[in-house]
Amino acid sequence: MKKIELYSVTPEQLQNAIIEGVKTQLESLKIHFETKQPRTYLSRLDVSRLLNVSLVTLNKWNKNGKLKAVGIGGRVLYRQCDIENAIVEL
């Protein structure tokens, strides 16, 4: 066990140092903490209806990298969070 000795520190200074240390650790935890939500996947048809574009346009966006599709089995699906992130406010 380590021994810590404090000299010339008032109780208020010690309390403030502890509070600042805890705040720093909590801020670090907030940055790295993510709530776990189940991922929602949408089909090509769902995404085309949602964005009001054709399936050909979706294919072009996928090839250009504007949208990222994932393949599961023989199906092409899009993560809903990727769709929401791809929509840019003008």
Image (cartoon, rainbow, N blue to C red):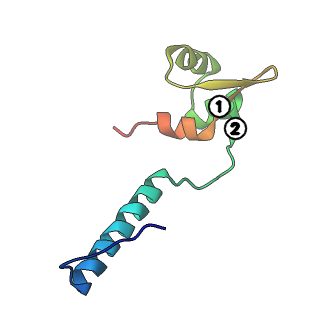
86 displayed left or right of 5: right
Image quadrant assignment for residue 48 = top right
User: In the rendered picture of this protein, how many numbered marks are placed on residues?
Assistant: 2
Separation (CA) of disc 1 from disc 2 = 5 Å
Q: Residue at x 82, y 23 (%)?
A: 73
Classed neighbour count for the residue bearing mark 1: other residues with Cα under 10 Å, few (<14), some (14–19), many (≥20): many
Image quarter of the C terminus: top left
Query: Residue 68, image x and y in percent?
Result: 58, 25
| Mark toward the start of the polypeptide (1 vs 2) | 2
82 displayed left or right of 39: left
Q: Amino acid at mark 2?
A: Tyr
Query: Residue 65, image x and y in percent?
Result: 51, 19
Q: Secondary structure at mark 1?
A: strand
Image quadrant assignment for residue 35 = bottom right
From this view, report whether residue 78 is shown above or below residue 37.
above
Q: Residue furthest left?
A: 8
Q: Residue at x 39, y 69 (%)?
A: 22
74 displayed left or right of 15: right
Query: Residue 72, image x and y in percent?
Result: 77, 26
Q: Residue at x 64, y 20 (%)?
A: 55
The residue wearing badge 1 is: 78
Image quadrant assignment for residue 43 = top right
From this view, report whether residue 90 is shown above or below residue 30.
above
From this view, report whether residue 26 is shown above or below residue 89.
below
Q: Amino acid at mark 1?
A: Tyr
Q: Nearer the viewer, residue 89 or 6?
A: 6
Classed neighbour count for the residue bearing mark 2: other residues with Cα under 10 Å, few (<14), some (14–19), many (≥20): some
Q: Nearer the viewer, residue 81 or 33?
A: 33
- Label 1–label 2 contact, CB within 8 A: yes
Marker disc for residue 41: 2
From this view, report whether residue 18 is shown above or below residue 84.
below
Q: Secondary structure at mark 2?
A: strand
